[in-house]
Image (tube, rainbow, N blue to C red):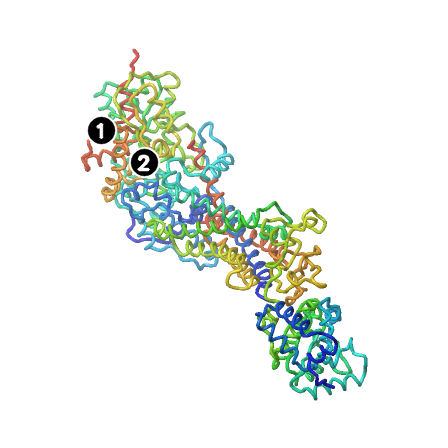
């Protein structure tokens, strides 16, 4: 078994299993934690909890008008790397083939060249996110190991992916194996650190949406 | 047995001009990407070369490699090459049989001690004392080790000899191993492929003859001249890959349009061979050109890479089962964790 | 207050409080730091420790220690006495639970609720500002944080009624509406109480005070002492039930509205047998019903939204409705309504003496807002905001004026005979 076989086989399989296991564990441990019934009377004419939750999930995709200026960097850069990652993951044929092979699901994808460019932009955007984390006094103060480690495991697949398509520095099968291994690390870390916000963002926004809508805010 | 005439003299006898010979040498040289000066040197050395004793051993193989090398569409000179090496042992090509041919082998080994070249096609079974393949009452292992003892170099022709190949494919019932796994004290040149490109075989032999040394090899013991680049990088369908145009099957629009075969399992990106540049049958075509993805036949264990039609980026092994099991376990663990927390909470709220 | 710190009590309190919403919020932070943009304590000081997200740490740590991956295996670090002490200042002195950071958070984390829960855990451990705790104990033992006992209330109401020649009904059985007071008003802004009575009387509302449940403020809640919070809530509920009222009105007080309107039913474990209105909501209702008429109020002024009425209460519109057609020179400040800056004294911070310096810094944000409107009068509908602003005004020698919406309305009431 060579490195690529290891990456495509045991490594990615175990990583996927750990990711799915961890995500469901953490998500269910929260979702089934229970919530005391709210006996207060909702303000008249406010949306129900589900509608409010969905509205809040959508609404926070863009900054609150009051803070649009203060948020300009985070909003812009945040969107760039989130969308960039999504485009690279779901718009590149080889990536979709990974999903298709597992689930049978497939969809049209982008020209590889476009994905390379998006990948490069994502890389720059992630680098900018780190620079800000290191230079902004607030972010620097509140950041911990999780923040930096999560950044590393997020940017590694982007770097290794670009290096692999560029055939830089080593043989392609080695680069591909390293790319897949870096994804394995990302998948394994996903449920345990702050990257779990990929799931919690919806629960959290929804909870707050329902909470505030009841009050008519 | 050995003919004392040089290759150049023999060629002249056969009516091959020096000019034609230099042309052939530079063709071979350019295939191997040697500098022009080296090609000229190669021609000169080849012309001076004595007939090289070659012993060809066939173990667990299908004779496809021999088929390939004999049907080479290359210049007629290639056929002549066989006149100028002394092929002292070859099951398929030799006229004699039985004790006589074994004696011929021993005689060649004795006479050319330390100078002869051993070419092997096929892997060696090691399980159960090697009983799965024997010749003249000897296991392949014994024959191999006896023969290579005084050889100058060993050339493993075909993926079976180079890496174990199909006999070694899971579950490897005969315990097949490659020649390189067994021969550690001689240079071993691997020319894998199922079969290898004929010119890769003849070119390597010619190099060995003219320079008396092993050509530059990669980490898998393959001549870099033929195995230095991967198929994907040299594939004429590469632009379709970059454009994101993929054949989804062998009978769809993409297939008819000659789009990239990545999605139907082409292993071009991880396969190192000269198929996309030298092609086959005298440069007529190669598998991808004929509409099928590369199987990766010149790579170790190509038979066990998760399937010829599984895309390179897909995972291999029981991913779905594992993930399904993990999902179930995760869900149970999550609900259980929540239940424990709720229980603790309620006992706190009571107490 | 106990002298020994009981960390286990805090850990247990966290566990008891953290359900799905708090667990989600405690785990969802990505440390983007945007909440600092929304927090007046950070903006006033530029000290990163005031970043709202930083205030999540104790609850997150306690939560992880009991329910997380490592927590289930007993491997996660537990909350320590040092953690609680280190965060005391951040959770009590420099968080008004104003909810402004909730607006900016891309994850939608509600730090105000987290602060509320963390205060309960800290209070359970015996950690918190002595003066705030004393106010809560006072409320429990003497009926009011400022020592407004039942007898004093009766006394004062009589005096106010006489002085202002107004009918201030007390313990009137069968009344429709129970009006509560904030002891801040009774002690410092009694005009506000008279004004409420005047407006309700003019609209012909059948209302009353209660000598049993009169104090609207809930320092049990502010201090994080849940037992006191429940007791104080019950006083009003029981008084309302005894009198048979259908409506309880919360005076100009922010957290009192939040506690009674949005928490009380959950604190007592059953729906309230009456409706709860903030005074601005109720006056808006009366105005809508055509029961109140006002003479125009020409003065130029701006309106400060009490967080618990607007951003956390959902009643920002009612104050505007009251001002509509009545105050032509009303200028909105920027940002306003649900995005308005907090006064810096909410959430009990006003009662914490040592927080005064930072509150004065925060006050500068408010005065800048006022100056930008080109007016010099700052109107509000919360006595606590008013007190906070008043105190800072004196300390910083600000030249502007403070006003109460209820008082101004009462002054401009068209009295029908």
Name, please, the residue furthest toward the top. Answer: C417
Judge by depth and name the residue closer to the eye, B16 or B324.
B16
Labels 1 and 2: the sequence-earlier one:
2
Position in image of residue A125 (x %, y %): 44, 49
Q: Chain of mark 1?
A: C
Judge by depth and name the residue closer to the eye, C67 or A132.
A132
Judge by depth and name the residue closer to the eye, C180 or C105.
C105
Residue C341 tag number: 2
Relative to C27, C367 lies left or right = left
Residue C244 visible, this angle = no
* Rendered position, B66 above or below B109: above
Position in image of residue B273 (x %, y %): 63, 65
Quarter holding the N terminus of chain B is: bottom right
**Category of crowding for the residue at label 1, using alpha-carbon neighbours closer than 10 angstroms: few (below 14), some (14–19), many (at least 20):** some
Residue C200 visible, this angle = yes
**Which of the 4 image quarters holds residue B312?**
bottom right
Q: Which residue is rendered at x = 38% and y = 27% of the image?
A: C317
Position in image of residue C326 (x %, y %): 31, 19
Residue picked out by circle 1 = C401
Position in image of residue A90 (x %, y %): 56, 48
Relative to C303, C25 lies left or right = right
Q: Secondary structure at mark 2?
A: loop
């Amino acid at each position: 078994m060579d490195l690529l076989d290891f990456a495509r086989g045991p490594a990615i399989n175990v990583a996927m299993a750990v990711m799915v296991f961890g995500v469901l564990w953490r998500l269910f441990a929260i979702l089934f934690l229970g919530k005391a019934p709210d006996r207060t009377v909702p303000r008249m004419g406010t949306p129900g909890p589900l509608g409010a939750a969905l509205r809040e999930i959508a609404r926070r995709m863009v900054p609150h008008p009051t803070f649009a200026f203060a948020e300009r960097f985070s909003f812009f850069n945040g969107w760039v790397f989130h969308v960039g990652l999504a485009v690279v993951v779901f718009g590149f044929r080889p990536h979709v083939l990974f999903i298709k092979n597992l689930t049978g699901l497939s969809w049209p994808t982008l020209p590889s060249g476009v994905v390379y460019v998006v990948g490069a932009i994502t890389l720059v955007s992630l680098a900018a996110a780190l620079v800000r984390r290191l230079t902004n006094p607030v972010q620097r103060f509140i950041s911990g190991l999780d923040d930096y480690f999560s950044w590393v495991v997020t940017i590694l697949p982007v770097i290794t992916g670009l290096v692999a398509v560029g055939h830089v520095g080593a043989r392609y099968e080695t680069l591909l194996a390293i790319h897949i291994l870096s994804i394995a690390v990302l998948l394994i870390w996903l449920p345990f650190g702050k990257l779990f916000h990929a799931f919690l963002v919806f629960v959290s926004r929804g909870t707050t949406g329902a909470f505030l809508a009841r009050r008519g805010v | 047995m050995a003919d004392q005439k040089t290759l150049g003299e023999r060629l002249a006898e056969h009516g091959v001009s020096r000019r034609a010979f230099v042309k052939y040498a530079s063709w071979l040289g350019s295939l191997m990407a040697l500098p022009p000066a080296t090609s000229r040197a190669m021609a000169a050395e080849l012309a001076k070369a004595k007939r090289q004793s070659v012993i060809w051993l066939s173990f667990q193989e299908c004779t496809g490699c021999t088929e390939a090398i004999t049907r080479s569409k290359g210049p007629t000179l290639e056929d002549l090459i066989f006149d100028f090496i002394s092929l002292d042992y070859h099951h398929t090509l030799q006229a004699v049989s039985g004790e006589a041919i074994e004696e011929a082998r021993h005689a060649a080994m004795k006479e050319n001690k330390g100078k002869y070249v051993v070419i092997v096609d096929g892997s060696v079974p090691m399980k159960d004392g090697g009983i799965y393949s024997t010749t003249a009452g000897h296991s392949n292992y014994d024959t191999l080790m006896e023969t290579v003892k005084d050889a100058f170099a060993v050339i493993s022709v075909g993926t079976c000899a180079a890496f174990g190949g199909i006999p070694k494919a899971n579950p490897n019932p005969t315990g097949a191993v490659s020649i390189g796994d067994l021969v550690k004290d001689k240079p071993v040149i691997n020319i894998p492929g199922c079969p290898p490109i004929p010119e890769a075989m003849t070119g390597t032999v010619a190099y060995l003859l003219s320079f008396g040394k092993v050509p530059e090899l990669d980490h898998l013991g393959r001549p870099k001249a033929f195995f230095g680049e991967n198929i994907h990088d040299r594939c004429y369908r590469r632009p379709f890959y970059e454009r994101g145009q993929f054949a989804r099957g062998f009978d769809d629009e993409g297939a008819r349009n000659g789009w990239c075969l990545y999605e139907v399992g082409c292993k071009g990106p991880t396969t190192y061979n000269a198929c996309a540049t030298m092609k086959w049958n005298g440069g007529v075509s190669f598998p991808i050109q004929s509409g099928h993805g590369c199987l990766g036949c010149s790579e170790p264990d190509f038979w066990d890479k998760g399937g010829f039609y599984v895309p390179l980026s897909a995972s291999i092994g029981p991913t779905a089962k594992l993930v399904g099991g993990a999902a179930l376990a995760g869900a149970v663990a999550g609900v259980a964790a929540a239940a424990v927390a709720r229980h603790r909470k309620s006992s706190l709220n009571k107490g | 207050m106990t002298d020994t710190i009981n960390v286990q009590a805090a850990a247990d309190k966290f566990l008891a409080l953290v359900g799905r919403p708090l667990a989600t919020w405690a785990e969802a932070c990505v440390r983007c730091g945007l909440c600092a943009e929304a927090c007046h304590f950070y903006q006033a000081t530029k000290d990163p420790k005031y970043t709202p997200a930083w205030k999540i740490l104790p609850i997150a740590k306690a939560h992880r220690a009991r329910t997380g991956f490592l927590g289930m295996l007993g491997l996660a670090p537990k909350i320590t006495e040092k953690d609680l002490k280190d965060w005391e200042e951040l959770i009590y002195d420099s968080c008004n639970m104003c909810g402004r950071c909730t607006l900016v958070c891309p994850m939608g984390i509600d730090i105000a609720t987290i602060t509320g829960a963390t205060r309960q855990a800290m209070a359970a451990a015996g950690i918190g500002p002595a003066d705030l705790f004393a106010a809560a104990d006072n409320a429990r033992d003497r009926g009011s944080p400022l020592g407004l006992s039942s007898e004093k209330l009766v006394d004062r109401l009589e005096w106010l009624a006489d002085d202002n020649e107004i009918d201030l009904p007390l313990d009137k059985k069968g009344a429709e509406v129970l009006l509560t007071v904030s002891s801040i008003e009774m002690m410092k802004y009694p005009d506000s109480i008279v004004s409420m009575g005047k407006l309700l009387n003019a609209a012909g509302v059948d209302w009353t005070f209660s000598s049993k449940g009169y104090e609207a403020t809930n320092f049990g809640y502010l201090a994080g002492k849940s037992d006191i919070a429940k007791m104080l809530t019950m006083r009003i509920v029981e008084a309302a039930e005894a009198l048979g009222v259908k409506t309880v009105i919360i005076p100009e007080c922010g957290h009192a509205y939040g506690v009674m309107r949005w928490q009380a039913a959950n604190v007592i474990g059953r729906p309230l047998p009456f409706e709860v209105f903030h005074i601005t909501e109720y006056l808006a209702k009366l105005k809508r019903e055509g029961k109140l008429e006002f003479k125009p109020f020409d003065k130029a002024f701006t309106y400060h939204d009490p967080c618990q009425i607007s951003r956390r209460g959902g009643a920002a519109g009612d104050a505007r409705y009251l001002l509509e057609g009545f105050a032509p020179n009303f200028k909105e400040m920027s940002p306003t309504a649900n995005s308005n800056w907090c006064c810096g004294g909410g959430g009990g911070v006003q009662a914490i003496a040592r927080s005064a310096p930072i509150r004065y810094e925060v006050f500068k944000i408010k005065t800048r807002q006022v100056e930008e409107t080109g007016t010099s009068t700052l109107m509000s509908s919360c006595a606590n905001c008013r007190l906070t602003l008043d105190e800072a005004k004196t300390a910083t020698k600000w030249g502007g004026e403070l006003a109460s919406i209820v008082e101004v309305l009462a002054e401009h009431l068209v009295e029908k005979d």
